[in-house]
Image (cartoon, grey):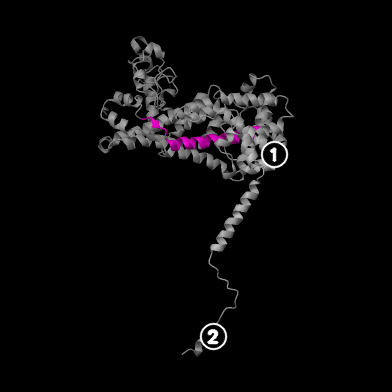
Amino acid sequence: MSDVPFGFGPSDRDPDRDRNRPRDESGDKGDNTPDGPQDPFGFGNLPGGGQFPGGIPGFPGGLPGMPGAGGPGGFDVSQLGQMLTQLGQMLSSAQTSGGDGGPVNYELATQMATQQLASTTSSLTDAQRTAVTDAVKLAELWLDPATEFPAGATETVAWTPTEWVKASMPTWKRLCDPVARRVSGAWVEGLPEEVRSAAGPMLAMVGQMGGLAFGSQLGSGLGQLAAEVLTSTEIGFPVGPARTAALLPESIEKFTQGLDRPASEVMIYLAAREAAHHRLFAHVGWLRERLLGAVEEYARGITVDTSRIEELARDIDPANPASIQEAMQSGMFEPQTTPEQKAALARLETMLALIEGWVDAVVADAVGDRLPGADALRETLRRRRASGGPAEQAFATIVGLELRPRKLRAAAELWRLLTEERGIDGRDAVWAHPDLLPVADDLDDPAGFVSHKDTADPIAELEKQFAADAEKAASEAPSTDTGEEPKDDEGPEEPPAQRT
């Protein structure tokens, strides 16, 4: 794992080192660069470029009169009005845009991401939209003989990075809510009862600020991610509306500039990957919920060091914000990774590797003989992921997960071997039920999995099991048919008039 979620610092961080680091050593940037002090709530990423020493966002150069502010002696009177205006806007946003009471202020996240992209995003041309539509149509034709799953996308669209942010926000909410809710509540649960009672109103305020903090970090991350992402499925599954294939032509053009391949070839290859993802998710109904369930299972296991909280809570002065910030930077809110969480992340990592490996193998079969640069593009995208591309950045921010290239390559090899041994239908039939899928150990030995399973027909095995279950249920049910004519012990019923 690379990071714990939502900007909580790594568990091995030395808080004394961060607090005592000389200003010239950290670069006096006041931001969240790796060389600077960690900001546990990610406040330093808001627009404006600066922050208060205590982590309040949106103020260019820092708080007036404090180190880091502009102007002689650290104070710039000309910026005071702008700073106060920005502070008012931030507090107003906290009151109006977090109305659902959730752990993350998603409206703030959307505003931040779109503002961050405003200067680099332009409107798409008709030619760009037509190129996306034509590429997906051609890719679908090529994919038809490569998989038994029919086309899964019923609509094809071209998105700007801003449109990607807005369209994907419901999915990010589903992914982020469980983790953010658990993180924001875990440390409160660990406080002594008397501390919680005394600081009730303050805890409510901290919760509201936590929603802003999580929203600010998510917005900043999505703004960076949207500028790089190429398709709606680049993180491993569709983040946009169901059955909507989406490509980002502006980002694809930038991506193509570093390659020695024609732009149309790159577009078609990416369209094939997008269409393959949609085929898989459209026809494997349990897949999306299984992925999201793994994230929720991870979130349920989030805990914090309550003994550390109790120790530091005694030193917090509610009237002194600096003491609160010092406590945050000391590591008191850092979640502890449990064995259950590690297991959930391992299952999620394996599932993502299987998805990406299947797409990798299917697209290679579909376009390999048609695009001269298919092998080069395949390797380029693998290396893009290995070097920390958008998918890794996204999942590292949310759940601390990295999709290891070794697992992806092993999964692609496994699907290739299955295709050779059992054909396209037999390979795709493995997705019929989650119990038929390879597990993590199988990815370490793809050939062993194939040789062990090559004589089994997944569908036949399922049908056999269903038949056995039905036969067992029928045998255990009480029988009401004796095979004899019904016996009339009481004779025919008398008409009502003849009854006495």
Residue at 72%, 29% (x, y): give it. 368
What residue does disc 1 label?
A: 421
User: Which span of residues is magenta-colored?
Assistant: 333-360
What is the crowding at mark 1: few (fewer than 14 residues within 10 Å), some, or many (at least 20)?
some
19, 262: nearer the viewer: 19
Question: Alpha-carbon distance for marks 2 and 1?
Answer: 70 Å
Q: Residue 491 carries which label?
A: 2
Residue at 38% x, 18% y is 62
* Of the pair 467 and 207, the residue shown nearer to us: 467
Is residue 335 covered in magenta?
yes
Residue 408 position by quadrant: top right
Q: Position of residue 333 (x, y in %)?
A: 36, 30
At label 1, which amino acid type do we have?
Answer: Glu
SS assignment at label 2:
loop
How busy is the neighbourhood of tag 2: few (under 14 within 10 Å), some, or many (20 plus)?
few
Residue sitting nearer the eye, 430 or 25? 430
Q: Where is residue 112 in the image (x, y as percent from the top left)?
A: 47, 27
Quadrant for residue 7, please give it.
top left
The residue closer to the viewer here, 124 or 34, is 34
Which residue is painted at 58% across and 28% down in the image?
406
Look at the numbered discs 2 and 1 and tell me whether their residues touch, using CB distance below 8 Å. Answer: no
Residue 356 belongs to the span the image colors magenta: yes
Instruction: Give the quarter of the image for residue 352.
Output: top right
Above or below residue 189? Residue 213 is above
